């Protein structure tokens, strides 16, 4: 069983906030594309255990790339040498390796076959300004938000909406 989402036409437009270094503005943009619980929900038949749709884990990974890039960029500007332990978990080398392979497999699982016209001056494509067929993000957010609090019992009285997997040794390859 999966949730039915309508397909809608959408032109991709560049939004600099999502690729910008962490700031109040860019962090708010990222926060707003997740439901309050970070995409976690529970449903009596679809997901009897607390779960998340893969897309929220994938977006969490992409945001980890943004944070990792910012960490390395700032260190390079300051001429600082970094050690693996200098990275917060979300942008640690082990987490980034996990995310690269997760996103690779996700893109291959649901390939977007929209045709993008080559910009000869650029020598490639931008991905923007082209019509895509997308499943409704609003419907997915609404459905997930509806079920995110179902039988929710926060551990130790706190809501943790940012982590999509444990931080144990399973990702330290």
Image (spheres, rainbow, N blue to C red):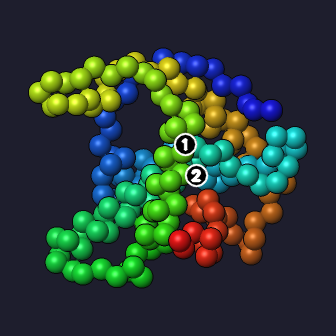
Most foreground residue, 23 or 112:
112
Give the number of the disc on residue 171.
Answer: none
Most foreground residue, 15 or 102:
102
Give the quarter of the figure containing the N terminus. top right
Q: Is residue 78 visible?
A: yes
Dot placed on the residue nearer the N-terminal end, 1 or 2: 2
Residue 164 pos. (x, y %): 61, 59
- In the picture of the structure, the residue carrying the numbered disc 1 is 106
Q: CA distance from mark 1 to mark 2?
A: 11 Å
Number of numbered discs present?
2
Residue 4 pos. (x, y %): 71, 25
Query: In percent of the image, x 24 and y 74: which residue is there?
Result: 75
| Residue extending furthest toward the right | 44
Are the residues tagged 1 and 2 within 8 Å (C-beta)? no
Query: In percent of the image, x 82 and y 54: which residue is there?
Result: 49
- In the picture of the structure, the residue carrying the numbered disc 2 is 57
Query: In percent of the image, x 63 and y 63: which residue is there?
Result: 165
Against 60, residue 79 (above or below) is below
Most foreground residue, 61 or 98:
98
Residue 37 pos. (x, y %): 65, 54
Q: Quadrant of residue 138?
A: top right
Most foreground residue, 109 or 57:
109
SS at mark 1? helix
Residue 158 pos. (x, y %): 69, 69
Residue 2 lies left or right of residue 87; in this view the side is: right
Against 161, residue 94 (above or below) is below
Residue 130 lies left or right of residue 113; in this view the side is: left
Q: Residues within 10 Å of mark 2 (few under 14, many from 20)?
A: many
């Amino acid at each position: 069983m999966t949730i039915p989402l309508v397909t809608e036409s959408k032109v991709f437009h560049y939004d600099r906030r999502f690729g910008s270094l962490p700031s109040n503005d860019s962090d708010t943009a990222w926060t707003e594309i997740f439901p309050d619980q970070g995409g976690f929900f529970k449903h009596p038949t679809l997901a009897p255990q607390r779960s998340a749709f893969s897309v929220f884990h994938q977006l969490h990974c992409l945001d980890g790339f943004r944070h990792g890039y910012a960490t390395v960029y700032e260190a390079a500007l300051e001429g600082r040498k970094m050690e693996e332990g200098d990275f917060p978990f979300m942008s640690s080398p082990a987490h980034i390796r996990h995310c690269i392979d997760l996103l690779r497999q996700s893109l291959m699982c649901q390939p977007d076959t929209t045709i993008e016209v080559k910009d000869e001056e650029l020598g490639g494509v931008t991905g923007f300004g082209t019509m895509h067929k997308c499943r409704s993000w609003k419907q997915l957010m609404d459905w997930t938000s509806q079920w995110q609090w179902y039988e929710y019992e926060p551990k130790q009285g706190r809501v943790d909406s940012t982590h999509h997997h444990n931080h144990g040794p399973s990702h330290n390859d």
